[in-house]
Amino acid sequence: MIPLKDENPTKTFPFVTIAIIIANVLVFIYELNLGEGLQDKISQFAVIPYNITHLTEPAALLTLVTSLFFHGGFAHIFGNMLYFWVFGNNIEDRLGHLRFIFFYILGGILATFGHILIAPDSKIPLIGASGAISAVLGAYVILYPRAKVLVLIPFFFLWRIVRIQAWWFLIFWIILQLFYGTASLASAQGAEMTGVAWFAHVGGFLAGILLLFFFLKRKKKKDKKEDL
């Protein structure tokens, strides 16, 4: 299933959501122009679990953030940015622009540790915004479970657009991540064999739910006075 848009209007303009999308696109254009030097840059800015767990050098910690802006191909960045565009603006609207920046980055970092816990000695570079975006999805399912989402369902030559509630779509999505992630562990080299960090998605989704309660703006309660 591919989300196209949600029917969930916002009160504020999503400056941060758009800025993050632009940043990702610009970095991807930069990648496309690196030519043979691309692999060196990926090695420099991607998360390498072994370097984090063994902390080979302090600069490795910076990759927990820089890796969120690199992608492995057109399908990778398009899928991530599509999900982020559909669901990110509402979370930014609810948290506020500044809080949303920290929520996104911290969600992405915690999501990365979800992968590192599964493959702590891996030396395969990890890139992509999907962990941070998974945190956004986790927050969305808590805040707007009944919001309607237009979803494209491809089935061989039949493509159909349906309107479903967000909780149904997002719970189905996280179940798929758990299924593929668990299946990947059965292989000889675990999650590394699939080329997808499934447990970064799972970790990000759970992180988004937990972080939401720290970042959510508290509504001020008006004191009610009763005449006696």
Image (spheres, helix red, strand yellow):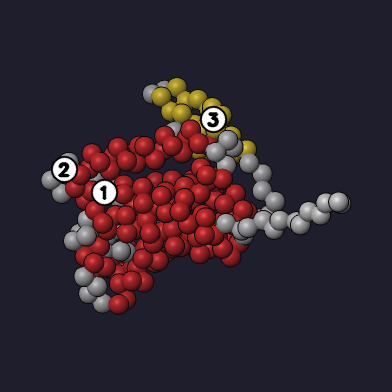
Query: Does residue 7 appear to the left or right of 103 in the view shown?
Result: right
Q: Is residue 38 visible?
A: no
Q: Circle 2 is placed at which residue position?
A: 187
- Up-down: is 51 above or below 138? below
Q: Residue furthest right?
A: 227
Q: Residue furthest front?
A: 228
Dividing the image into 4 quarters, which one contains the N terminus?
top left
Query: Does residue 2 appear to the left or right of 59 in the view shown?
Result: right
Helix, strand or loop status at disc 1: loop
Q: Circle 1 is placed at which residue position?
A: 195
Q: Nearer the viewer, residue 193 or 78?
A: 193
Helix, strand or loop status at disc 3: strand
The numbered mark at residue 164 is 3
Q: Nearer the viewer, residue 156 or 192?
A: 192
The numbered mark at residue 178 is none
Q: Residues within 10 Å of mark 1 (few under 14, many from 20)?
A: few
Helix, strand or loop status at disc 2: loop
Q: Nearer the viewer, residue 15 or 29?
A: 15
Q: Nearer the viewer, residue 61 or 128?
A: 61
For the residues labelled 2 and 1, the Cα–Cα distance comes to 12 Å
**Type of residue at label 2?**
Ser
Image depth: mark 3 or mark 1 in front: 3
Q: Residue furthest left?
A: 188
For the residues labelled 2 and 3, the Cα–Cα distance comes to 35 Å
**N-terminal label among 2 and 1:** 2
Q: Residue furthest bottom?
A: 58
**Type of residue at label 1?**
Gly
Residue lying at 30% horizontally and 64% vertically, measured from the top left: 47
Q: Is residue 221 visible?
A: yes
Q: Residues within 10 Å of mark 2 (few under 14, many from 20)?
A: few
Query: Does residue 206 appear to the left or right of 100 in the view shown?
Result: left
